[in-house]
Amino acid sequence: MLVGKRVCLRPIEREDLERFVRFFADPEVRANLDMVLGLSNAQEITWFEEQSRQPLLEQPFAVDLVQGTDKPRLIGGAGLRAFDWRNRSAELGLVIGDKSMWGQGLGTEVTRLLLRHAFFTLNLHRVWLRVFADHVRAQKVYEKVGFTLEGRQRDGDFRNGRYRDVLVYSLLSREWRQRVGEPEAPPPPTTPRSDG
Ligand SMILES: CC(C)(COP(=O)(O)OP(=O)(O)OC[C@H]1O[C@@H](n2cnc3c(N)ncnc32)[C@H](O)[C@@H]1OP(=O)(O)O)[C@@H](O)C(=O)NCCC(=O)NCCS
């Protein structure tokens, strides 16, 4: 569980699925996700079961609002995927599915929690993400927490009868450590040479 001031990231439960289906039924929530159509309950259950078969450290999180509510309230999902353990990289994604919660700094808090988890717990080296070129709100979040724009997939997405570019951002472990004031991770131990 990743605990922040206002949100908490925890494993997804079967009981959450209905709410996720409702989040994704909203065209405004889907508009900037790699999801053109919503999901049926059955499709969501299939997704959940597939995720449950992934290694524990690769499974996505439910995002609960924990501040100002009597009990935690599910407001979205977030996680890392496309794990490449040899190169130590993964792709970050998040959705605040409850639109009434947008623009209050929660997306930024979720992103920071995921980055801390990625670099300080999973020992990843590079976290990257894709965001549509016209999705300025999300770009603000990613730039605010230190991501660097590294590329543009021209006409990378087609919907509503037009193409739009897809931007690729990344953040390296050393850049993150510098931002949060943590020293570089020590190098891995080496075997002493026998020839002195
Ligand atoms: C994108 C998303 C994660 C952002 O989360 P959020 O909680 O709304 O974001 P925050 O409140 O932390 O930060 C938003 C920033 O964008 C700014 N912003 C908001 N609307 C904006 C707009 N239309 N144009 C430019 N900037 C905007 C805010 O001022 C804020 O920046 P600031 O903190 O410097 O003032 C959330 O809106 C969401 O989940 N959307 C649906 C799914 C999605 O798009 N996921 C991301 C896919 S890449």
Image (cartoon, grey):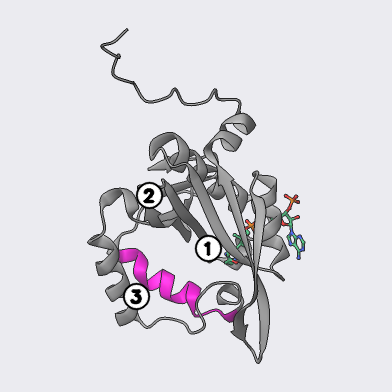
The answer to which of 40 and 156 lies nearer the viewer is 156
Q: Quadrant of residue 31?
A: bottom right
Chief SS of the magenta region: helix
Give the amino acid type for the residue marked by disc 3 in the picture: Glu
- Circle count: 3
Residue 159 shows in this picture: yes
> Which portion, as a residue range, is magenta?
15-27
Pointer 1 residue: 95
Q: Residue 121: x percent and y percent? A: 39, 36
Q: Which mark is residue 47?
A: none
SS for dot 3: helix
Q: CA distance from mark 1 to mark 2?
A: 14 Å
Label for residue 44?
3
Q: Is mark 1 within 8 Å of ligand 1?
A: yes
| Residue 72 or residue 32, whichever sits in front | 32
Q: Quadrant of residue 6?
A: top right
